[in-house]
Each structure stands twice: as structure tokens, then as C-alpha cells.
Image (spheres, helix red, strand yellow):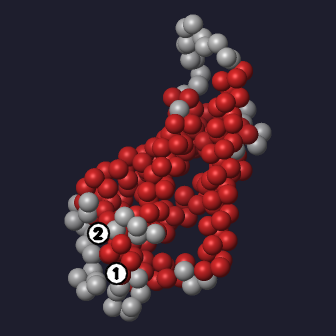
Amino acid sequence: MAITGFVAFGYIIGHMLGNLQIFIGPDQINAYAKALHMYPALLWVVRSALIVAFGLHIWLGAQLKLENLAARPVAYERKNTVKATLASRTMIWTGLTIFAFVVYHILHFTATTVNPAFEHLTDAQGRHDTYSMVILGFQSVPVAVMYLISVGLVCYHLSHGIASMFQSIGWNNRDTERWFRIISVGISTIVFLGFSAVPVAVLAGYLQPLTGGN
């Protein structure tokens, strides 16, 4: 869980930094998107590794949940949680919700199945107009709101996952536990603000699609 979670976390940070390039301008984000697709074979190697990591993470999480249930086949008559946080107790549910969001997100912006017209957007240099695609996608209020809620769940999941990762690799103890929790919440907050910045900027009218997009 720690290793696959770390892979997923690394992807989340990279994806966030890539998204934030939209604030530099259309040329930057469109060039970045084009660069990612210059080597299709390498891109699919990375994608395959991520799919395996995400799949294993979900499977291992489900296995842990089933093991926990099997360890106590009879439920507590009165459950009084003392130390476990709500985030730790809902990891399986936030994880499955995040999975559903990731599938939709891929269909929306990567496969353009939700909006086939996005596939044909081009900029003045003939590159795929990722800049306009993202902005047009988030101009839909329901899509933007769903995205913000889903990102919130991702970060809520991370707030426990990062701290749990340190515990899994044996770095957590009485002296470091508090600091790891603070670090986890801090990183999760930064990730939430980073991912939320784009849809919020679109809804606020700060980001507009290219006027020359086809």
C-alpha cells in the first residue's frame, strides 16, 4: 500500500504542476501537452505502470478492508473510536469514489469521449489546443463543481495516506507522529489549492479560451 500509494502521490504532484502551466499561457501548456505525446511508446509505458500501481493500490485496500472485517465477524455492540480519524476510517470509500472520478476525468480530457469536439481543437501552430480544451471543460459549472469535490476527496484521502505511508515504512513513532500528521495535512492542502486553482480561475472568468481555436 505504501509503495503504490507513493507512486500515485508522485503522479498527483506531477499532474498538478503540469496543470498549473496553464497560468503561464496557452503556448506553454500546449507545448507541454505536445511534448508528453512526442514518444507514444514511452507514454504508454508510464501509463501502464500507473494503471498497475493504481490497480494494486485499490486491490490491496480492498483486501485490507476484507481482512479487517474477517478479524471481527461480529460487530461491536457499541463502537467508540478513540484515535482513528474519520479520514482513516473512510479510506476505502473515498478511494472508490476517487477511482470513479479518475475514470470520468480520463474520458473527459484524455479520451475526449464526453466531449468529442475537444479532439479537434487546435491552436495557431496546429497543435492540439489543450489550453482551450481545459477552459471549455471547466466552463460547465456541474463539471467544475464535481471536479472540486473530487479533488477535495483526493486530498482528504491523502491527508491520512501520507501519514500512513510513513508508518508503513517504519519512520513513524511517538516523537514524529504529530509532525507527520501536520506535514500530511499541509501537503494535502497545497495539492487541493493547486488543483482547484484552474477551475476556480475559469469560473471567475480569469481564464478564457483562445479566440482563434477551431
Total of numbered circles in the picture?
A: 2
Instruction: Determine the residue positioned at 55% across, 8% down.
Output: 78
Q: Identify the residue at the far top of this view.
A: 77
**Element type at mark 2:** helix
Q: Residue furthest bottom?
A: 125
Mark 1, residue position: 121
Q: Where residue 27 sits: x, y (%)?
A: 39, 83
Q: Quarter of the image containing the C terminus?
A: bottom left
Q: Is residue 213 left or right of residue 50?
A: left
Task: Please name the residue shown 41% across and 87% down the image.
Answer: 127
Give the residue at x 66% y 77%.
Answer: 42
Whole-angstrom CA distance, mark 2 to mark 1, is: 11 Å
Q: Position of residue 208 (x, y in %)?
A: 25, 72
Q: Position of residue 165 (x, y in %)?
A: 68, 43
Q: Nearer the viewer, residue 181 or 14?
A: 14
The amino acid beneath tag 1 is: Leu
Front in this rendered view, residue 116 or 53: 116
- In the rendered image, which residue does mark 2 sit on? 136
The correct choice, above or below, for 189 with respect to 204 in the image is above
Q: Amino acid at mark 2?
A: Leu
Disc on the earlier residue, 2 or 1:
1
Please tell me whether residue 102 is drawn above or below residue 184 in the rendered image.
below
Quarter occupied by residue 45:
bottom right
Q: Is residue 179 visible?
A: no
